[in-house]
Amino acid sequence: MAVSKLFLALFLVFMVLNLEKANGEATGKTKKLIDMANRKGPYLGLVIPNLFEMNPLLQHPSYKPTNLTIDYAGRRFRFGYIDNQPVILVMTGLAMLNAGITTQLLLSLFKIKGVVHYGIAGNANPSLHIGDVAIPQYWAHTALWNWQRYGDGPQNELPLEVNGDYTRDIGYLKISKYSVNVTNCNSHNNLLNNVWYQPEEVFPVFGTPEERQHIFWVPVDPHYFAIAKKLEGLKLEECIDAKTCLSHTPKVARVHRGTSASIYLDNAAYRSFIYNKFDVSPVEMESAAVALICYQQKTPYIVIRALSDLAGGGDSENEAATFITLAANNSVEVVVQFIKQLSLTKYQDA
C-alpha cells in the first residue's frame, strides 16, 4: 500500500512538472515573439470591432502586412505598415466588454504610441447623413445607470449617492415622457420611472492605486483631433454599385461628442433624446470602452466612425444592411489618410 501511494505521488509530481514545462514552452514562445515585436516598436494600434470593418483595411493598397501575427488570449495581433508607420491591427468583437479587454491587452503587451479606433456607427445628429465619417472630440458610456425606484423623483437622493457612488449631476431619462395613447390626462407616470446617467469609476496610471476617480466625457488626444481637421475635404465613396448611390456627397466631420453602450440602438425616440440631451453624433457599441482604457493608461487615441444608418430612422427598415460596406470602406479611407497626415506631421515637426 505504501509503495502504491509513493508511486501515485511520484506520478502526480511528474505530470505537474511536465504540464508546467508544456505551459512554459507555449508561454515562452509567445513571449519571445512579443519581445521581438517590441524591439521594432513603438506602434500605432488600430483597434477594430469586426471583420467586415477590418477586411477593407487588409485589402487597402496602403496597408503592407508583415509575416508576423501573434495570437494571445483569443485575440490575433497583425503587424504591418501604413505609410511607413508600424501598426498593429486587432479585432475586438462586439460591444464594450470585448473592446475594453482587447484595448487593455494591446497596451499591456506591446509598445504603443497611440491608438486609432474605427468602424461604423448609427447616427443621432440630423445634420449628418449616411456615409459621412464622424470624428468626435469626446466619448461617453451612456449605459451606466442608476434606475430609480417608482415614486422617487429628481428631489430624492439616489441610493449610495452620499458615499459618492452615484450622482444626479448628469441628468436622467423619465420613461413616462415617452408614453403613447394616453388621453384626457395632463400628467401621467410609469412604473419604470427614471434612469439616471452615471460617470465611470476609473483608476488611471497617473493616479493612486485603489483611489478611484470619475469621468463621463473622455477627450480624444488634442493633437490627433487637430490633425483630423485636415481630412474634412476628403473624397469618400458615394455608391454601392451603379444602381445604389447616396442622395448626397458624404463628408468627414469633426463633431462634439459620441456615445457608446452595449445596446444596438434602432429607436427614434431614444436617438432624439440622447442627441438633445448630450449633443452626440455617432452612437455605437465599443468606442467609449477604448476611450476609457486609453484615458486610464495615458495613451493618445482618436475614434473614426462612418455612419451606416439613422438610428431608428429612415423610411423603412434599418439602413445598415444596405450601406454597411460603403460605411466600412469610408471609415478605412479616413483612417489611412489620418495616418498619412500623422506621419507627415511627425516629419515636419522633426
Image: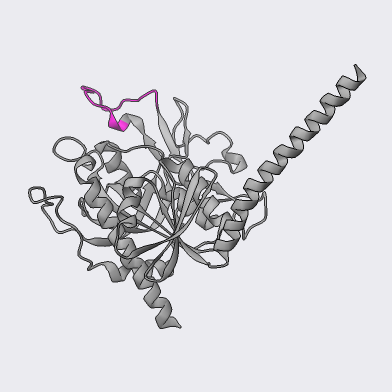
In the depicted view, which residue is nearer to us: 330 or 11?
11
* Highlighted magenta segment, given as a residue range: 177-192
Q: Residue at x 34, y 56 (%)?
A: 58
Reply yes or no: does residue 189 show up in magenta.
yes
Res. 280 in view: no
Query: Where is residue 182, by image quadrant?
Result: top left
In the depicted view, which residue is nearer to us: 347 or 139?
347
Q: Residue at x 19, y 42 (%)?
A: 322
Where does the image place residue 87, in percent across and percent down from the top left?
A: 44, 63
Viewport quadrant of the N terminus: top right
Residue placed farthest to the top in the image?
1
Eyeballing the image, is 349 above or below 271? Answer: below
Query: Where is residue 176, by image quadrant?
Result: top left
Q: Is residue 15 left or right of residue 119?
A: right
Reply yes or no: does residue 168 show up in magenta.
no
Number of numbered discs on residues: 0
Where does the image place residue 158, in percent across and percent down from the top left?
A: 52, 35
> Magenta region, mostly helix, strand or loop?
loop
Where does the image place residue 9, in percent across and percent down from the top left?
A: 84, 27
Res. 131 in view: yes
In the depicted view, which residue is nearer to us: 241 or 7?
7
